Amino acid sequence: MSKAPEFSCTPEQIRNIADVAINELEKEINNIVGMPSPQRSFKNTVLAFEAALDRLADETEIPQFLSIVSADAEVRKAGEELKTKLGRYTVDLMTRDDIFNALNEYAEKGEKLPPLDARLLEKRLREFKRNGLGLETRKKNKVKKLRKELVGLCVEFQKNIREVTDVLEVTAEELEGLPQDYTARLKRTGNGGYLITTDFPDYIPFMENAESEDARRRLYLMFSNRCAGANVRLLEEALSLRRKVAKLLGYTSFADYVLDDRMAKNSETVFDFLKRMQAKLKVKARKELRDRIKLKENGAALSAWETAYYTNRLRKVKFDIDHQKIREYFPLETTLKGMFEVFGELLGIGIVSAELPVWHKDVRGYELRNADGSVAAYFYLDLFPRFGKYKNSLCSIVRVGRELRDGSYNLPAAAIVVNFSPPSGDIPTLLKFAEIEALFHEFGHVLQLILCRAKYSRLAPINVAWDFVEVPSTLLQQWVYESSVLRRISGHYKNPQEKLPEEVISKLISARNMVSGMYYLRLAALSMIDMRYHTACGKIDTTKLYGKLMKKVSLVGIAEGVHPQASFGHMMPSYAAGYYSYMWSEVIAADLFGVFRSSGVMNSETGGAYRRDILEPGASRGETVSVEKFLGRPVTEEAFLRSVGAA
């Protein structure tokens, strides 16, 4: 059994890691490419290459992760430098003719391989070809140059978002409508004012609850202009470089290049999907918009800074739901304990708090254990905001699981990084309902990443098709709306035995689709923006196009003078031409959840089938094969449309 990961890296160590690890890798690569062709075997060529890449990852994965979570600015900086250096080195590595030729020489022997070995070889050869192998030298070198430039742009873009320090000063009067535990933790100014940051724990409650429209407008403008000075330029440079890469590789657009290796296969499929969803949702969304506008005294059109506020008011009017009161039933510890119990029972696992090495004193470590008590994986919770930390919610791989040469297993590790409000005085961290959904979502990613016993790291869950990545996470969110689960994860912070009242549970479930039309139209709008950015034939005005599509698709436009694309971190780089994956995954997840609903949402046999058919295969087979194995048929969109009230 491999030990838990260590995170005690100094900036100097991180800066030395790349050169040492790359030099070792180069020695191994030289042995592989220098081998005479007749002597090539799967073991000394394909597996040797995989082993070399795995050792590089073992040395560099954690230092790169620290670039987004470390409290030490120098560690973050060194991690970013490492990420940039490795990204550029990987571009060189995966476009080397000698490595490709070595792999191809073995492949041309035509040896009969077991399915996993054959898939590994096929994946690697395809990866080289998609990176330009087969192009004439001049074109291939141009692709390499452009890809290296993209690495630097993306690292800088994300760094700018993480290091935003913008604050809005408001008066005590402008805090009217906010709960006491929110105002109590705000920093004060010398003249009696209060400082609101653009971090989510500050921004979202303020936009939902502040009575002052002017204060909401000012905060919205600040939030929607984060990093505008630098990141609009970086994004537009990246879009230009991506267009050039796609053209050199023989694709109509960067989106078509990306999608060729995903479930959707091409941009036409994605556009058709988004337009179909838009058509199904718009009638419901328009009614939802009218309901919100009716709450305004003047009945004027809804401005962008009013959407969250009037959604919250509508929820109170229609369902008498007060999310500030509901938070009191979801103290962090109670909710975590309940969530671990629910999915532990469903999937046959144990989740135990453990004294593990961590990267910050607030981080919690856990062991995921098999039914026999043996450790299967590690995971971590990094719960509260701090300067320099990733601003949104994510699940990050910390160590990829794989079989080792000695027959043992390198246990996987993953981390949930979120930004919940920290405890305030005697009041513990109380989770908003949306934060509970986010927690379940990210835990779905954790289970996806660590419940697979992959033979090879290239076939581990981190390498599934990107438009399948969000399926397990989206699926787990469905349990948040089950009454039996809400009872198990709730308990008033003053009296833990007092569960969320049944009438409130009923209201929450009934209110789920109160604004689902507009929510999913906004998702479709962001997906359409991403796709239009990455299918454009030439330079575009990203701000103008963003505003046009938000108004046309989501029904609520953006304000003049804002640049929300500057903080649209998904596009730099992971979800470039991939934001549609969220809605795509919603459709698949709704269909999968229908199986649980039919058998009982806590049915351990169904949970076992889900673990066996969806989680454990990872990338060892096609994602469509896994889904149809569990469903017993192809996916349909009906379950999703019914679940959001648009059928």
Image (cartoon, helix red, strand yellow):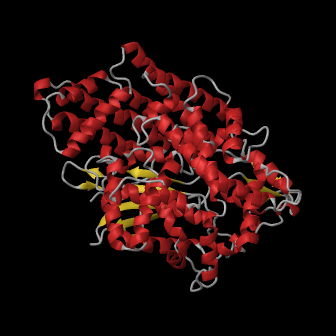
Please, is residue 601 above or below residue 464 in the view? below
- Number of numbered discs overlaid on the protein picture: 0
Q: Please indicate, yes or no, whether residue 13 appears anywhere in the rendered image.
A: yes
**Residue at the outermost left position:** 38
Which of 82/319 is in front?
Answer: 319
Let me know if residue 348 appears in the view: no
Q: Which quarter of the figure is the C terminus placed in?
A: bottom right
Give the left or right position of residue 409, taking residue 144 as reference: left
Q: Quadrant of the N terminus?
A: bottom left
| Residue 158 location (% of width, % of height) | 58, 40
Res. 349 image quadrant: bottom left
In this view, 206 is above or below 238: below
Residue 450 at what x, y percent from top left? 37, 57
Q: Residue at x 70, y 37 (%)?
A: 548
Of 70 and 548, which appears nearest the observer? 548
Which of 3/201 is in front?
A: 201
Question: For this view, does 381 lie left or right of residue 543?
Answer: left
In the rendering, at what x and y percent does residue 94 appear? 35, 29
The quarter holding residue 487 reads: bottom right
**359 to 607, vertically: above or below:** above
- Residue at (37% x, 29% y) in the render: 130
Which residue is located at x 56 percent, y 77 percent?
490
- Give residue 489's position: percent from left, percent from top: 53, 75
